Amino acid sequence: MTYKEFLNLAQQEAIAGQNSITSPILDIGFTAEVLVPEVWQAVVMSYAADPQKASLLSRDHTITLTNGVGDLPEEVLTLCKFNSTAYDPDDDVVGPTVSLVRTWNDFTSPSSLDRLTTRYTLKDQQIFWVEQGESYSSTDGKDGDVVLNIPSVPEIPATEDTEIDAASEFLSDAITSLAQRLRGVMEKAA
């Protein structure tokens, strides 16, 4: 679905059951675009709060590590870190056997995990990575790319003809939410 189609569907839903010729929505059509960031955030946060829906926001992000640390893209929802998975695309031996360590203290403290598994944690918009058989060090670690799959905020397109990269259920909920907000604007304008 393109951004233009998304906006049109929300406007059509907002004026459903009203006289489309006299509806104030025709005079405030540009308002839909202004409301999109607010609607997007509300729908994203409701999805993030529901583990089953959060998975609909999951995206792969290739992250470059230097000394075992990499910056996360700003659209990553770190509050959903427990729904994340990670792997090293160049590692044929360990492959998908990478463990999320939930807390920073557990990640940095030596443990029996050191020899058993490659592991990662997320902290302050960064990913920290330790290879199997190694202990955490702030000055030494993996260099290279890893892939993190984690719920992320879908991008709001910059142009009307751009396809929206989001699950259809998310788009449906966003259309309904935008339509409800537009109805509120119409009621105030009437």
Image (cartoon, rainbow, N blue to C red):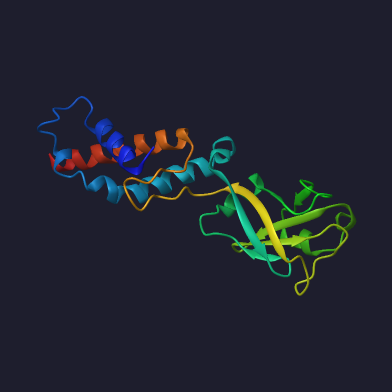
Q: Residue at x 58, y 35 (%)?
A: 52
Q: Is residue 163 above or below residue 139?
A: above
State the quadrant of the N terminus.
top left
Horizontal arrangement in the rendering, residue 168 relative to residue 178 (left or right): right
Q: Residue at x 54, y 38 (%)?
A: 56
Picture coordinates of residue 27 (x, y %)? 13, 43
Please provide percent x and percent y for residue 133: 88, 59
Q: Is the C terminus in the top left, top right, bottom left or bottom right quadrant?
A: top left
Q: How many marks?
A: 0
**Residue closer to the observer: 12 or 123:** 12
Pick out the residue farthest to the top. 17
Residue found 55% across the figure and 54% down from its top: 76
Q: Quadrant of residue 185?
A: top left
- Give the left or right position of residue 102, taking residue 2 as reference: right
| Residue 188 falls left or right of residue 153 | left
- Rendering coords of residue 155 (x, y %): 44, 50
Name the image quarter holding residue 8. top left
| Residue at 20% from the left image edge and 24% from the top image edge | 17
Extreme left residue here? Answer: 22
